[in-house]
Image: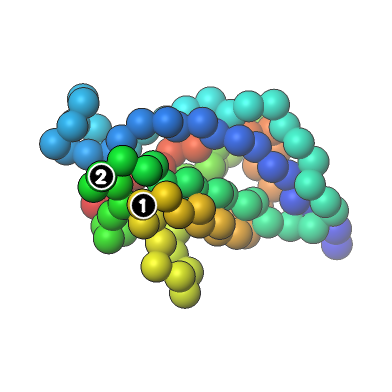
């Protein structure tokens, strides 16, 4: 069977902290227009951690993808062999799930 990889950009551009701004540690954002990446099956999630002092976390970060017709992925823990979510760092995670069609939002948060 054939699977597709699709790419969306979710511009979060905010802190997820109980101590700052609105104290939210989870947000939902709409994606930018779709970009087809290849004919394989994964969703690639790229997280760029900010560059201000104190940026970064050792918390458990999770993500859920939402698609057409109420479809959604399971909650994925974003983790790999790297030291993730450090100041000024770009982390890339590949998650495999059912085809969700056109993505409508990403939920990302931490404990």
Q: Residue 31 occupies which quadrant of the picture?
A: top right
N-terminal of the two: label 1 or label 2? Answer: 2
Tell me the crowding category of disc 1: few under 14, some 14 to 19, or many 20 or more residues within 10 angstroms, Cα based: some
Q: Which residue is mark 2?
A: 53
Q: Is residue 77 left or right of residue 8?
A: left
- In this orientation, does residue 104 appear? no
SS for dot 1: loop
Residue at figure coordinates x 51%, y 31% from the top left? 11
Q: Which residue is mark 1?
A: 87
Residue at figure coordinates x 51%, y 53% from the top left? 90
Query: Split into 4 quadrants, where in the image is the N terminus?
Result: bottom right
- In this orientation, does residue 102 appear? yes
54 or 59: nearer the eye? 54
The reply to whether the C-beta atoms of the residues labelled 1 and 2 are less than 8 Å apart is: yes
Residue at figure coordinates x 25%, y 44% from the top left? 53
Residue at figure coordinates x 44%, y 64% from the top left? 79
Q: Is residue 1 left or right of residue 97?
A: right
Residue 70 location, x and y as percent? 56, 32
Q: Is residue 35 left or right of residue 24?
A: right
Q: Is residue 68 above or below residue 110?
A: above
SS for dot 2: loop
Residue 63 location, x and y as percent? 44, 48
Tell me the crowding category of disc 2: few under 14, some 14 to 19, or many 20 or more residues within 10 angstroms, Cα based: few
Residue 86 location, x and y as percent? 36, 56
What whole-number distance in Å separates the C-alpha atoms at marks 1 and 2? 8 Å
């Amino acid at each position: 069977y054939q699977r597709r990889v699709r790419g969306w950009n979710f511009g979060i551009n905010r802190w997820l902290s109980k101590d700052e701004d609105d104290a939210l540690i989870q947000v939902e954002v709409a994606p930018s227009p779709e970009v087809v990446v290849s004919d394989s099956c994964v969703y690639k999630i790229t997280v760029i951690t900010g560059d201000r002092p104190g940026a970064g976390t050792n918390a458990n970060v999770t993500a859920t993808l939402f698609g057409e017709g109420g479809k959604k992925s399971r909650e994925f823990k974003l983790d790999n062999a790297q030291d993730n979510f450090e100041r000024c760092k770009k982390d890339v995670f590949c998650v495999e799930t059912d085809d969700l069609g056109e993505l409508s939002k990403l939920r990302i948060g931490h404990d």
